Image (cartoon, rainbow, N blue to C red):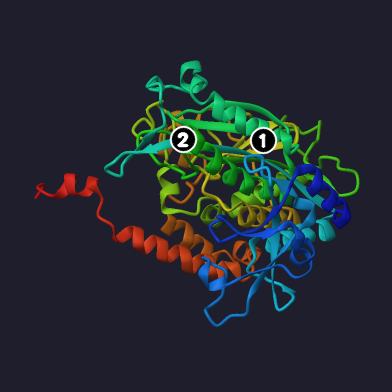
Amino acid sequence: MSINRDTLRSQFTDDGVQFLLAQFVDIHGSAKVKMCPAETLDALADDGAGFAGAAVWGLGQGPHSHDMMARIDLDTYTPLPWQPNTARFAADIFVDDKPYAYCARTNLKRVLNQLKEKLGLIANIGIEPEHFLITKNPDGTIAPWDPGKVDTLAKPCYDFKGISAAIGYLQDITTYCNQLGWGVYQADHEDANGQYEVNFHYSEALTTADRYTFFKMMTSQVAPKYGAIATHMAKPFADRTGSGAHIHYHLADAKTGENMFTNEEDPRGLGMSKLGYHFLAGVLKHAPALCAITSPTANCYKRLQVGPGLFSARSGFTWTPAFISYGDNNRTQMLRICGPGHVEDRTVSAAVNPYLAFAAYLVAGMDGINNELHVGDPNLGNLYAMSRDDIYKRGLNTLPQSLKEALTALETDTVIAESLGPIAREFLSVKWREWNEYHRQISKWETEQYLTLF
């Protein structure tokens, strides 16, 4: 049940809120907003803020279409800590007073309702928001943000000197998130120079998607205070580790909240239930098509590379599994069983639209549950240290190695396509256009490699 409007108005007064942002996302997961005076609360909740849908990527509208109305979800009241007189509400899109099927948030709610109604379950998901702080040079190139000129180690992960300049930024982000009740429990320097992560507690899937969207908004506003640009691009530097948005998850009983992935008597010794293994089997079955949603840009596939990453990361590892596998507490697996009933998918890109990704992911897992798919035995040991032939002998396959390959898989996977409803057509259209535009470009590497070779 939504929070009482009178309670909200009282909260506006207490928080000094004078303006509201009605916010939704486009097909890329980018936040779109309209700013309205706080006095318009009733209109935003009853009717919504009007948008021309054709002006936004992937919303299924043309210039002739009826207005999209972003109708705010009162339970998502989120004051902007960096703009104290303003608050954000996540919104669902309506057209002609009906829920709009091309709205990514509305679609996720549809899938979550199916999960609850058909299986009596809810999805609890956490996310690790890796991102870079960068600067732009006068010639348009970029560099890791490093005002002290000390973040230069080949293995900078957790390094004190590397994180020291960013402590103010990370403390601002941590303070802001905790003001909102997110429960940040750690922040660190990640594996690449200029790369950071702030971890907050998991929540129900829709809440986590809303928070991740707001987190990206927050970093974009806090970073300039320190002379930096925050980027959630998957692979901004060819020689450094890319940014993921690893998801941690389990399904829980909708009535009791009990983790339904847990089984202390698991014969495989990983503490997982049969239902959990069926879910993982569905994810692995649909992994090629899922990859199009969880790694949705051409750039993402510079991150999803087979092998240890000696040539694509100064630290020696990409930390991104590229084989379709599951295993124990082992970071070389796509699906890592961190502990009883606790699964992590390490392949998800920072460029992800969380609403689309969670919807597709849950439908893949539900397919495994409904059809009681078998996941097989876990893969143990270091996949990075194995040759391709050895890994293929284990019966493992690679994730798509290009956006083109992933989109082709999505086109033939009706389960994943249907998880997005009509958004699937828009997604494929936008992403094929993106791939074709990317594929037409001539890179500096190509001219250096081939210009005088022949």
Residue visible at 51% across and 69% down? 55
Q: Quadrant of the N terminus?
A: bottom right
Q: Is residue 36 above or below residue 422?
A: above
Disc 1 secondary structure class: helix
Q: Quadrant of residue 433?
A: bottom left
The residue lying toward the viewer, choosing from 206 and 290, is 206
Image coordinates for residue 337, horizontal then vertical, percent: 66, 34
Disc 2 secondary structure class: strand
Q: Determine which residue is flagged by label 2.
A: 133
Image coordinates for residue 436, horizontal then vertical, percent: 36, 64
Residue 320 appearing in the image: no
Q: Is residue 222 left or right of residue 119?
A: left
Q: Determine which residue is flagged by label 1.
A: 176
Image disc number at residue 353: none
Badge 2 vs badge 1, beta-carbon distance below 8 Å:
no
Residue 241 appearing in the image: yes
Q: Which residue appears farthest toward the top when viewing the image?
A: 160
Q: Amino acid at mark 2?
A: Leu
The residue lying toward the viewer, choosing from 144 and 362, is 144
Give the alpha-carbon distance from disc 2 to disc 1, as whole Å: 18 Å
Residue visible at 58% across and 39% down? 129
Q: Is residue 301 above or below residue 378?
A: below
Image coordinates for residue 9, horizontal then vertical, percent: 83, 53
Residue visible at 79% across and 60% down? 113
Residue visible at 74% across and 57% down? 38
Image coordinates for residue 271, horizontal then vertical, percent: 75, 32
Q: Residues within 10 Å of mark 1 (few under 14, many from 20)?
A: some
